[in-house]
Amino acid sequence: MTFSPHRRLAVGATLIAAIVGGVTPAAAHATTAAPSAPAASRAAAPAPDMEGVVAALNAAMANGAPGAMARYTGPEGVQARAVGVRDRVSGAAMDSRARFRVGSVSKTFSSVVLLQLADEGRVELDAPVNRYLPGLLPDERITVRHLLTHRSGLADYTDKMFAQTVPGFESVRNRVFGYRELVDLSLSEPRTTEPGAAYKYSNANFVVVGMLIEEITGKPVGQEYERRIIKPLRLRNTAYVHPDTRVEGLHVRGYLHPDEAGAPLVDSTEQTVSWAQSAGAVISNPADLNTFMTALMRGRLLSPRMLDAMTTVTPTDATNTRFYGLGLRRYDLSCGTQVYGHTGTVQGYYTYAFATRDGRRGLSAMANTSNRGAANTALGGSLEAAFCGKKPAAAASSSRAVRGVPVLPAEADLPERR
Ligand code: REX
């Protein structure tokens, strides 16, 4: 990527301070203008409610996660919390420094790479995908932007693949797919919408994004993540190792819930994640995810024009609180704060990685389980606690609420996924 000297300096300042203090410091913030954040919302930012964050982590455990953790970064500093275990056999405690599989948070990495290529004039967002990958898709009207916004109509082949959770997982755990095989799986099903007509989340879109990156750069996506994101931001705990099945270093083991009630959890840590690749195979940890999302929001990775395009959103459901931009979600929280980032689900791991639009505050949370929507939804409560702060005691009431805020079902449980 091409950093301007100014940006390069700003990144350097942030990194040095981050290494010294473990925080993206106020001093570094002061050197760069926060992009398009209303001054009022900055002044009013509440301190994170870390008790509320822990309550959300405990609620994820009460709903079947062996452990959970979260890390908040903001002007007040960094705070991390962990509950339960990261390894059920050894009993090792959850550790907020540990690495895990981030699932679809990988889509934001892929989107950043493609948008940098757009910044460099090497791809046009409104051009047909087939201009770059001739003959790949059966419809010339599907554009690059349709992929990034989940509006292509390409079916999500993972719905069929994982219709039976454990057999589906075991059938692909060690498989190595070519991108084209995954696209063919999608194209063997009817398309879900006319190009551009509606939002319909599909992993196939970001498989094609991976193909575009490789076609345009002539390099594997892993190298492009490395060169454009991981190295410049010094994300030492972030890796793309496909098709290697291991998670190296200090890591969290993932535990998949079978569909059958009462059946033992399946340790799903080792897998190729080849079924997702550029749609979901990145490994990271909470500190790196916070660095990534806050740096992205602060304009360190994209031009202002491209970041505007990325954060231009449409609703994903009828709640009018959840939106999708280009490989990026926006959640509108009960206190009015808008946060941008992504959620992730791979077998054994649920992830949330979000930051405010000014990049001053970030939260990453994970629980080491999946196929347990209630655990995912509970984990999502950490966003409210972290970004909205403590709720007045009187507001904490009904059982459908965490700290007085009604809990919305997690992405995977919304009708859009059915
Ligand atoms: C695959 C099935 C889930 C997981 C999936 N993951 O599509 C992508 C992702 C990479 O992260 N998407 C989510 C399995 C929605 C996101 O954006 O947050 N489920 C599981 C089943 C269901 O097998 N039968 O829960 O581990």
Image: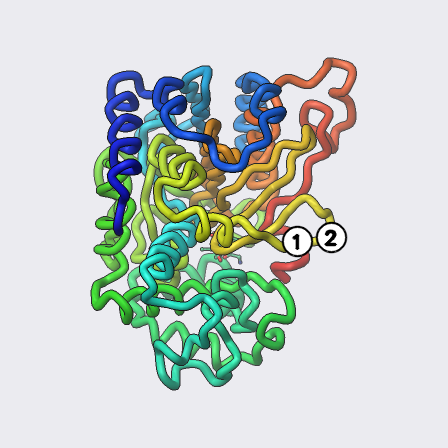
The image's colour scheme reads rainbow
Is 105 drawn above or below residue 287 in the view shown? below
- Residue 298 is left or right of residue 237, and the answer is right
Q: Please tell me which residue lies in front, 305 or 260.
A: 305
Seen at 21% across and 68% down, the residue is 218
Residue 125, picture quadrant: bottom left
Residue 185, numbered label: none
| Dot 2 crowding, Cα within 10 Å, few <14, some 14–19, many 20+ | few
Residue 10, picture quadrant: top left
Residue 315, numbered label: 1
In the rendered image, is residue 299 in sight?
Answer: yes
In the rendered image, is residue 62 in sight?
Answer: no
Q: Nearer the viewer, mark 1 or mark 2?
A: 1
Q: How far is mark 1 from mark 2, CA to CA?
A: 7 Å
The image position of residue 373, as x and y in percent, is: 59, 45
Q: Please tell me which residue lies in front, 303 or 199.
A: 303
Q: Please tell me which residue lies in front, 167 or 320.
A: 320
The image position of residue 60, as x and y in percent, is: 55, 33
Quarter of the picture containing the C terminus is bottom right
Seen at 39% across and 65% down, the residue is 209
Kind of residue sitting beneath label 2: Ala
Q: Secondary structure at mark 1?
A: strand
Q: Are marks 1 and 2 in contact (CB under 8 Å)?
A: yes
Kind of residue sitting beneath label 1: Pro
From the Cβ of disc 2, is ligand 1 less than 8 Å away?
A: no
Seen at 55% across and 61% down, the residue is 201
Q: How many marks?
A: 2
Give the residue pinned by disc 2.
Answer: 318
